[in-house]
């Protein structure tokens, strides 16, 4: 820098730049940022997730203004949001529809990373922060689902808190801290409200880490070969800003369709009945995004076994960068993975559908086969495939 | 910062490192101590508010094959009057083979209910209606109400089956039989829940899983 004190700093961009270089940072990271030329539509789901999170936080804040976290008033306050508060129905519908959009995009975003090998070196931390975000979203979604204090809220919370209680060693103190009393009631509702609220902002923090990691290691691409020369890249703006913008318009059309035309498509009627600690609803079901894990709990005839397999089905994803040591990234270039991974995706969907049906012997059998394949794929096929590829 | 300062001796470095380590250790200990009141504030302030209360129930309106439910200590308690067919079904050998704990070996009931019908009198069954899996309330299925219903309890949450005596099926996620509360018959149609005349020392906190 040449004698900064003598340069007149009257030019506003320059004035800002020398005190806080945000404009050059944005230019480097969001205008001139080099992107692979060959990204397909699956690379837009990260943008969808950011936009959905923004909708969730905005609608959540305005719901919190009208919500009362007290078991005698919670249910009525949610009904009032739906029926009396001007535009309350819209804000709540935006929040409830947003959960579905968030989980749908999360699962597709993660599936994309599995298919194109985006979890491999040097993107391990990108993968781990992303999975961490998924777990945080799950905790937040659970806590939020309890807040309306309907029948599904109550029994969902009962099941989850008992599941936490059943974890060896730490489970009992942890569930007691959440519950704060002998029975599920006011104290727990208030704590879950605070948890829901706090987690939302914690998620924003981890998203910042996730995006920062992405900007260090750059995007993977469908070929799985990182661009080496500038001619193999395109600047983020205008190429990917316009493309993500167009994709976002399509995404928002689906989201708006859910919010305006099908607000009750994915809600369960039983949750519009106030919580009753003496009666569990006959056709209790989880929300679709938790159905695969619910199906695992039902299909394993052992409590600890079910909890271990349900949590293990997610835990195994965290170890994937080390289970799969092959340098080949996309499944399209790996014969074994190309067959096995779609079956693992199908297993996840079978579990999801099974979780939404009554536990008949046929669905239990289908769930068990699906659970087996999920673990076989990650624990056997992936290490085996990478070993064969590395030796050839 | 003075220029004339001599480079620190190895002894000085050691003293500086000791001070730094000591500060970090004490700082961490202080942070942990500070966390204690925060965690304490989350604990349940009311210690055991639900002592073993007594509840008297009139059974005169219960006809054979019927069931009723009452609330005791915040738990739903199921009371059923069993028919001779239900009692026979409880003893069928091929049925016993499907149960995880047919002989009630796990402490889920007072001593006077540790028998084949898991109750004080065979004719009446009294059970706490909280699934031992993850705490939902199972519903009673009368024999023959659905093609597969053999009479017993079905938990809608994760599909655990219990027989009419609350014994859990082997092919279910629930680990234990349904708990039996301590009860005493005051007369033929009057039941007291909360105290067991046959096992006076029994307390609900002895139960393995509720």
Image (spheres, coloured by chain):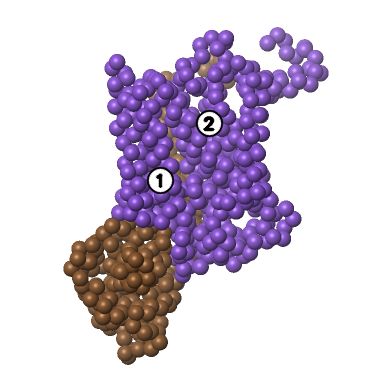
Instruction: Estimate the x, y position of residue A179 in percent, counting from the top left.
Output: 47, 59
Which corner quadrant holds the C terminus of chain B? bottom left
Q: Earlier in the sequence, mark 1 or mark 2?
A: 2
Q: Residue at x 45, y 52 (%)?
A: A356
- Whether residue A189 is visible, yes or no, is no
SS type, badge 2:
helix
Pointer 2: what residue? A210
* Residue B67 versus residue A220 in the image, above or below: below
User: What colour has chain A?
Assistant: purple
Instruction: Estimate the x, y position of residue B2 in percent, counting from the top left.
Output: 57, 18
Q: Residue at x 60, y 16 (%)?
A: A234
Q: Residue at x 32, y 51 (%)?
A: A300
Chain letter for the residue marked with disc 1 in the picture: A
Which corner quadrant holds the N terminus of chain B? top right
- Whether residue A261 is visible, yes or no, is yes
- Of residue B131 and residue A183, the one placed in the foreground of this image is B131
Q: How many other residues sit within 10 Å of disc 1, few (<14), some (14-19) or many (≥20)?
A: many
User: What colour has chain B?
Assistant: brown
Residues at marks 1 and 2, CA–CA distance in whole angstroms: 29 Å
Which label number is shown at residue A351?
Answer: 1
Query: Could you tell me how many numbered marks the image carries?
Result: 2
Left/right placement of residue B93 relative to residue A363 reads left
Quarter of the image for residue B28 reads top left
Left/right placement of residue A258 relative to residue A225 reads right
Q: Residue furthest bottom?
A: B187
Instruction: Estimate the x, y position of residue A32 in percent, counting from the top left.
Output: 64, 17
Q: Residue furthest front?
A: B147
């Amino acid at each position: 820098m040449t004698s900064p004190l003598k340069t007149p700093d009257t030019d506003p961009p320059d004035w800002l730049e020398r005190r806080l270089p945000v404009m050059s940072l944005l230019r480097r990271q969001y205008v001139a940022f080099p992107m692979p030329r060959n990204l397909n539509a699956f690379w837009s789901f990260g943008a969808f997730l950011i936009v959905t999170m923004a909708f969730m936080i905005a609608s959540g804040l305005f719901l919190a203004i009208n919500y009362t976290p007290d078991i005698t008033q919670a249910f009525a306050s949610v009904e009032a949001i739906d029926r009396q508060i001007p535009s309350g129905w819209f804000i709540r519908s935006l929040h409830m529809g947003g959960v579905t959009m968030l989980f749908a995009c999360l699962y597709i975003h993660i599936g994309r990373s599995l298919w194109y090998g985006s979890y491999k070196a040097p993107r391990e931390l990108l993968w781990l922060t992303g999975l961490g975000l998924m777990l945080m979203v799950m905790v937040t979604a659970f806590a939020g689902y309890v807040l309306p204090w309907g029948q599904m809220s109550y029994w969902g919370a009962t099941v989850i808190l008992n599941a936490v209680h059943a974890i060896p060693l730490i489970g009992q103190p942890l569930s007691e801290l959440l519950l704060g009393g002998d029975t599920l009631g006011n104290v727990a509702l208030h704590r879950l409200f605070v948890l829901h609220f706090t987690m939302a902002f914690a998620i924003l923090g981890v998203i910042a880490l996730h995006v920062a990691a992405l900007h260090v290691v750059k995007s993977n691409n469908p070929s799985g070969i990182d661009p080496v020369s500038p001619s193999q890249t395109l600047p983020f703006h205008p190429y990917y800003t316009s493309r993500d913008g167009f994709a976002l318009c399509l995404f928002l059309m689906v989201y708006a369709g859910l919010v305006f035309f099908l607000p009750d498509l994915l809600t369960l009627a039983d949750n519009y009945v106030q919580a009753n600690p003496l009666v569990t609803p006959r056709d209790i079901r989880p929300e679709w995004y938790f159905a695969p894990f619910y199906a695992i709990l039902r299909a394993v005839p052992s409590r600890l076994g079910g909890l271990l397999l349900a949590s293990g089905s997610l835990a195994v994803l965290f170890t994937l960068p080390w289970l799969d040591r092959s340098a080949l990234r996309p499944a399209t270039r790996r014969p074994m993975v190309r067959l096995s991974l779609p079956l693992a995706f199908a297993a996840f969907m079978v579990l999801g559908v099974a979780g939404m049906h009554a536990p008949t012997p046929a669905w239990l059998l289908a769930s068990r086969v699906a659970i087996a394949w999920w673990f076989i794929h990650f624990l056997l096929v992936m290490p085996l495939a990478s070993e064969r590829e590395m030796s050839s | 910062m003075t220029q004339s300062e001599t480079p620190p001796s190895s002894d000085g470095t050691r003293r500086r490192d000791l001070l730094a380590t000591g500060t970090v250790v004490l700082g961490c200990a202080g942070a942990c101590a500070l966390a204690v009141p925060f965690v304490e504030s989350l604990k349940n302030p009311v210690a055991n508010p639900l002592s073993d209360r007594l509840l008297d129930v009139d059974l005169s309106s219960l006809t054979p094959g019927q069931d009723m439910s009452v609330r005791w200590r915040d738990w739903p308690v199921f009371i059923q009057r069993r028919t001779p067919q239900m009692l026979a079904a409880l003893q069928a050998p091929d049925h016993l083979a499907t149960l995880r704990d047919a002989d009630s070996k796990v402490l889920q009931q007072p001593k006077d209910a540790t028998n084949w019908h898991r109750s004080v009198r065979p004719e009446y069954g009294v059970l706490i209606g909280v699934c031992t899996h993850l705490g939902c309330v199972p519903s009673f299925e009368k024999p023959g109400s659905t093609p597969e219903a053999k009479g017993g309890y079905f938990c809608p949450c994760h599909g655990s089956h219990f027989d009419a005596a609350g014994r859990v099926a082997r092919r279910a996620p629930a680990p234990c039989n349904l708990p039996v509360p301590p009860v005493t018959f005051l007369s033929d149609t009057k039941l007291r829940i909360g105290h067991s005349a046959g096992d006076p020392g029994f307390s609900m906190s002895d139960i393995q899983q509720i």
